[in-house]
Amino acid sequence: MATVLVVDDAAVDRKLVGGLLSKGKDLQVQFATTGEEALEKLAEFRPELVVTDLVMPGMSGLELVARIVEQCPHIPVILMTGKGSEEIAVKALKAGAASYVPKGVLHQHLLNTVQDVLLMVQERSSHARLMDCMKRGKFHFVISNDPSLIPLLVNHLQSLVMSVGLCDEANVIRVCIALEEALRNAIFHGNLELTSEQREGDPDVYEKLIAERTAAQPYANRHLEVSLEVSPSEGRFVIHDQGPGFDPAKLPDPTDPENLEKVSGRGLLLMRTFMDEVSFNETGNQVTMVKRSPAQEQAS
Amino acid sequence: MSDSMESKYIRSEQQGNVLVLTPLFTQAVFAEPTGAGEWNQVQEQLDAPGTEQIIVDLGEIPYFGSTVLEWMTQLWKRVKIKGGRLAVVRPSAIGREVLNVARLEKLWGIFDTRDQAFTWLAKPQA
């Protein structure tokens, strides 16, 4: 039985939505009349889904979406919008709402949308349950110089790190920032041999250079090897590029007042700040980064 | 009076002599074909005679790395030539940490709200 919390200040609309949802199988409906009351109810019990009106006195539906995304990110929200509020609906989707249904077509679409979103939540939760059982993961990726793969890989690593419970959410984000920096360095500075000076120049020229090198030898055949091993006590990430390498000791300190105004050069600083250990091989084309769990870090 | 414009990666609002830019990206978008076009557009706005100061509103991105720092440094350098300043508003906790690690609070004002930033920018430089 899935519980749906319906939030609407108008009694007639609450009745309408409650009636529509009562036709669904295994749905239990609870009500709140304002955004503030909805948040209080969320503290009392955890519904599987929230359906909220957009325009309400006090906290708006849009604000409620933002608060729920912040406080209970696993609970999806469907927004009911009035005529002419499509722009706000888009904002709500960007803010994290799962879907929206115009009030004029509630009869036709609300129940289907609720059931679709609930199905998605159940699938996600089944996958999360399985991932919760994972105690150690070892992966090896070989990727081309395609920067659009970076966010995909980082998202994947993020879910692995979270699944094994290596660290809290804030530290997971720190790990992601460090990984993104390392992957970008490996593609752009490593395999494509682009310099910071080129990067700081004309963006059109830089783009052309990226395109040229991505297609030309010897850059085109180069790839990245990304190995990672995660467990509840430690994450070890190794990124190897096929460029000529560099000497990290020769990089200027970006926090030195003399270098503070330089446009680039902060990637390695962020990697070193957000990981517990960062080391390079002798050639400088392979970086190994380690993140330990708080308990492991204390012990070491 | 405020004129606003939103593209895929940046929302820009002109409020008096202050250009408020809200990045909607965390990745290296300016290494993508559409990104450079947007950067050129922002440069035009920065170079317009009416723009003297910049606010970068980081409230739409949960975290960021060196790409966003590079982008902001380029903006700052551009407006510094005109004698202007750059204020950063609404960074997340992690975002504030990134700014502090890079010691960029020494170059820019960092604030929780736009109002605080507008007040700071309105004061004469020390």
Image (cartoon, coloured by chain):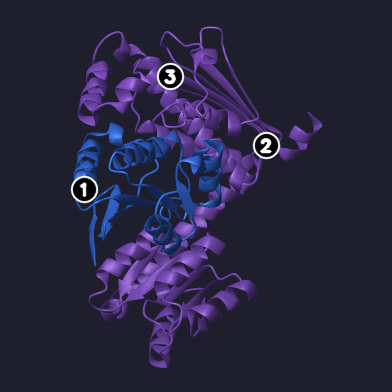
Chain colours: A purple, B blue
Which chain hosts label 3?
A: A
Cα distance between the residues tagged 3 and 2: 26 Å
Q: Which residue is mark 2?
A: A135
Q: Determine the image quadrant of residue A287.
A: top right
Q: Is disc 1 placed on a helix, strand or loop?
A: helix
Closest to the observer, B41 or A119: B41
Q: Is disc 3 placed on a helix, strand or loop?
A: strand
Residue B65: % across, % down: 46, 38
Residue lying farthest bottom? A12
Q: Which quarter shows the C terminus of chain A?
A: top right
Cα distance between the residues tagged 2 and 1: 52 Å
Left or right side of A88 for A43: right
Residue A214: % across, % down: 27, 19
Residue at left offset 51%, top offset 83%: A31
Q: Are marks 2 and 1 on the same chain?
A: no
Q: Which quarter shows the N terminus of chain A?
A: bottom right
Disc nearer the start of the sequence (3/2): 2
Cα distance between the residues tagged 3 and 1: 38 Å
Which chain hosts label 1?
A: B
Q: Of the residues shown, which amino acid type is indicated by label 3?
A: Leu
Q: Which residue is mark 3?
A: A224
Left or right side of A200 for A162: right
Task: Using the image, tell me which numbered label, if any, was put on residue B45.
Answer: 1
Q: Is residue A144 visible?
A: no
Which chain hosts label 2?
A: A
Left or right side of A180 for A138: right
Q: Of the residues shown, which amino acid type is indicated by label 2?
A: Lys
Q: Are marks 3 and 1 on the same chain?
A: no
Residue A79: % across, % down: 38, 72
User: As displayed, is residue A65 above or below residue A279?
Assistant: below
Q: Are marks 3 and 2 on the same chain?
A: yes
Closest to the observer, A197 or A245: A197
